Image (cartoon, rainbow, N blue to C red):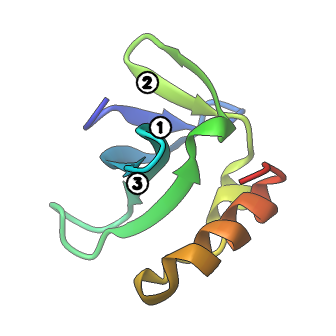
Amino acid sequence: MLGCPVTDRDGNVLGTVEDLLVDAGNRRFRLISVEHGGVAGFGATPSLIPVEAVHGVADGHIRIGRSSAQVADAPHVDQTRMGEFCESLYGYYGIAA
């Protein structure tokens, strides 16, 4: 999955999968890190998307069931408060954490 392009519900490319975040306690993938923008890997912005927001994996890409604007407006990563961030992110996507 790493390096796969990620598209929104309309087929617009959001970026590529740069990392997968795992819930070690439950032993399952929780978030995908999608980087977008930047040039040659510099200045790229990460977005974390719950795996539950993935609506399909086909033809070498991952499709998110949201618009690119919705993904762009999602809460930004706060690594100092990951618990609160994850609750906020899941709430934003309307997914039970």
Q: Which mark is residue 61?
A: 2
Residue 67 x/y as whole percent: 73, 47
Q: Nearer the viewer, residue 93 or 12?
A: 93
Residues tagged 2 and 1 counted as in contact (Cβ below 8 A): yes
Amino acid under label 3? Ser
Q: How many marks?
A: 3
Determine which residue is flagged by label 3: 33
Q: CA distance from mark 2 to mark 1?
A: 6 Å
| Residue 41 higher or lower than 28, as above or below | below
Label 3: which secondary element? strand
First in sequence: mark 2 or mark 1? 1
Q: Report whether 33 appears left or right of 76.
A: left
Q: Report whether 3 appears left or right of 36.
A: left
Disc 2 crowd rating (10 Å Cα; few below 14, some 14-19, many 20+) is some
Q: Residue at x 50, y 59 (%)?
A: 48
Label 1: which secondary element? strand
